[in-house]
Image (spheres, rainbow, N blue to C red):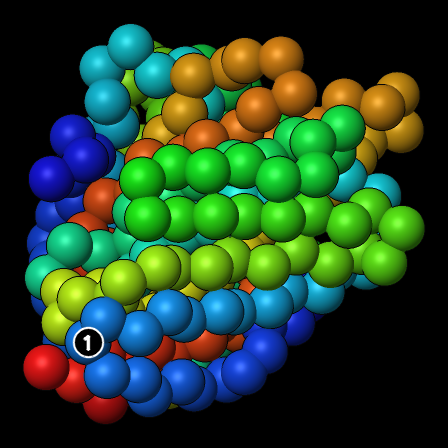
Amino acid sequence: SQQGEEDPQALSIQEGENATMNCSYKTSINNLQWYRQNSGRGLVHLILIRSNEREKHSGRLRVTLDTSKKSSSLLITASRAADTASYFCATPPRGPYGGSQGNLIFGKGTKLSVKP
Amino acid sequence: DTGVSQDPRHKITKRGQNVTFRCDPISEHNRLYWYRQTLGQGPEFLTYFQNEAQLEKSRLLSDRFSAERPKGSFSTLEIQRTEQGDSAMYLCASSLIRLASNEQFFGPGTRLTVL
């Protein structure tokens, strides 16, 4: 079953604009990860944010995490045509002893289209 | 290229046939995962190994599916008596155990079409 729900399902913007994608999840987590998938490079890890962090930056990416609302957002600033891809949030569920379980549970993804 | 390779990249088979996929993870990674992805959906977890031990299997993994990682390096996923509903992209990923982190590196996938 899918854990996360990304919102919106699809997003179309012009190059140079910012893109914001949201993700909600259901269970307790130790961390939340964002992945990008396009036909050329497959599924690639972008950024990981731990449950005790509220915000994290990596280049043009900014991720926030609100564990009280079980939600996260991914902001891509100054988007480029090469950012066109599907973006997924993924969480390793927390096991019975507090550690992360091995598998990742993915959402359905946001399909981002950046027009030149 | 993440360093995880999968073979074949595409497989077309007839319903009822058996198929086997191979995954070669990043060499020092001790965890190896299999996922399935259908169009418009995110990857769904099937099973994972830590070294040669299969630690977890999803309920999605019916008795027609079997996975092995005999020497703790490469892994194979076999589907017996394929059905049209098995048509999907099969993704392999690997990772190195770290505390409170589970970044996974994915291969390019094997696209299975069952006619």
What residue is at 45 percent from the left and 75 percent from the top? A110
Camera-side residue: A34 or B104? Answer: A34
Image x and y of residue B37, in percent: 41, 68
Q: Is residue A59 above or below residue A72?
A: above
Image x and y of residue B61, in percent: 57, 57
Q: Is residue B75 above or below residue A10?
A: above
Quadrant hosting residue B86: bottom left
Image x and y of residue A68, in percent: 89, 51
Whether residue B42 is visible to the viewer of this picture, yes or no, is: no
* Pointer 1 residue: A15
What residue is at 43 percent from the left and 86 percent from the top? A10
Left/right placement of residue B15 relative to residue B40 reads left
| Subunit of label 1 | A
Whether residue A78 is visible to the viewer of this picture, yes or no, is: yes
Left/right placement of residue B115 relative to residue A24 reads left
Q: Amino acid at mark 1?
A: Glu
Badge 1 local density, few (<14 within 10 Å), some, or many (20+)? some
What residue is at 30 percent from the left and 53 percent from the top? A43
Camera-side residue: A31 or B66? Answer: A31
Quadrant hosting residue B74: top left
Quarter placement of the N terminus of chain A? bottom right
Left/right placement of residue A15 relative to residue A88 reads left
* Number of numbered discs on residues: 1
Camera-side residue: B69 or B41? Answer: B41
What residue is at 59 percent from the left and 78 percent from the top? A7
Quadrant hosting residue A32: top right
Camera-side residue: A82 or B93? Answer: A82
Quarter placement of the C terminus of chain A? bottom left
- Judged from the image, the secondary structure of the residue bearing numbered disc 1 is loop
Image x and y of residue A64, in percent: 63, 48
